[in-house]
Image: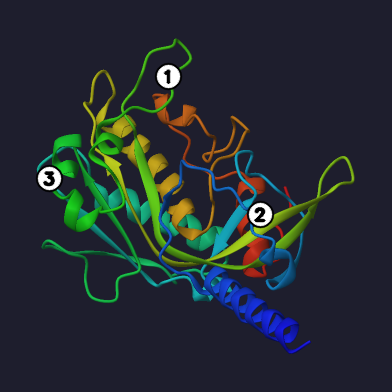
Amino acid sequence: MKKLLLIMLVLLVFITACAQTEIFSETEITTSSVPETETSVWDEIVLSSLGELSIWRDADSTIIGRWGPHATDIPTTIYIQNAGNNNLDLLDAMTFAVNAWNEALSIPGHMSVEEFQGDSPPAGARIWFVGGTAEQLVAVRRTLLPCFTEVFLTGTDRPDSSGNPRPRAGAACQQHRRREGHWIYINNYGQNVRITGRILIRKYGFIRARDQGNLTSEQLQNLYRNVAIHELAHALGWWIHSGQTVDIMYRNNINNTWPNARQTLTVPEINHLRQVYGLAPLIE
């Protein structure tokens, strides 16, 4: 009997340790383009229910992130650095994106953009973006973009509608995040879909400078603004991509190939994030 009790005690200690490791791990690394597989049974037992979601726009994932339960928990400063001389006005693009998401999340003036120099982001920085050509981004990868490989920085997105490859317009990466709990979304078939909630700790990314080609300067800058809105959304909690071509968050970034790149977020892709920050949905 004593031997049985001892075995049960050892198992209990082991199970408790496993559960704590699952909950408090904050060193996982992923990129916005790589879906995550949730397999832990401890999510069901230990992690709290965060409530119901009224909309789900992410066609490629069942994960959503946030900085906290309120939009005011989002970091106030978005740091940026242009990695070299190129045609990218990163300050304009990110300021435009920040203003768009400030309005979308009903936090006017909350986020602002600040430029920085040097081989590392400012102490305490939680969101930052780097702009540059593929070569310039590779040059600063180890210090400013450590969770991106050189192949990722120089690779291509999915082919365009004609089957031609195109340079990756940008990307965002979550260096640290932890499980918060799970949401429930009732889909169009009446099924309960379990959505994993993540607390964001540090996010960074890049916007790639590209050849102007046959675009006017205004069209090129509109494209950069479009990419900045898309990548900032990932930094705010959008995990992968929308399946709707009208969205700036569309998975193939088709909007980034248009001469007149879309500048306005759709109501559904805004509501996708508003709901996890405790905000009432916008009405179309």
Q: How many numbered circles does the render carry? A: 3
Mark 1: secondary structure:
loop
Mark 1: amino acid: Pro
Q: Which residue is mark 1?
A: 159
Depth check: 198 or 249 in front?
A: 198
Which numbered disc, 2 or 3, marks the residue that appears first in the sequence? Answer: 3
**Mark 2 or mark 3, whichever is nearer to me:** 3
Where does the image place residue 27, in percent across and percent down from the top left? 40, 65
Residue placed at 43% from the left, 32% from the top?
A: 261
Which numbered disc, 1 or 3, marks the residue that appears first in the sequence? Answer: 3
Q: Which residue is mark 2?
A: 271
Which numbered disc, 2 or 1, marks the residue that appears first in the sequence? Answer: 1
Mark-to-mark CA distance, 2 and 3 = 37 Å
Quarter of the view holding residue 59? top right
Mark 3: amino acid: Ala
State if disc 3 and disc 1 touch (CB < 8 Å).
no
Mark-to-mark CA distance, 2 and 1 = 29 Å
Mark 2: secondary structure:
helix
Q: Which residue is mark 3?
A: 139
Instruction: Indicate whether 262 appears above or below 111.
Output: above
Residue placed at 43% from the left, 51% from the top?
A: 30
Where does the image place residue 45, in percent across and percent down from the top left? 74, 70
Residue placed at 17% from the left, 42% from the top?
A: 138
Q: Which mark is residue 179?
A: none
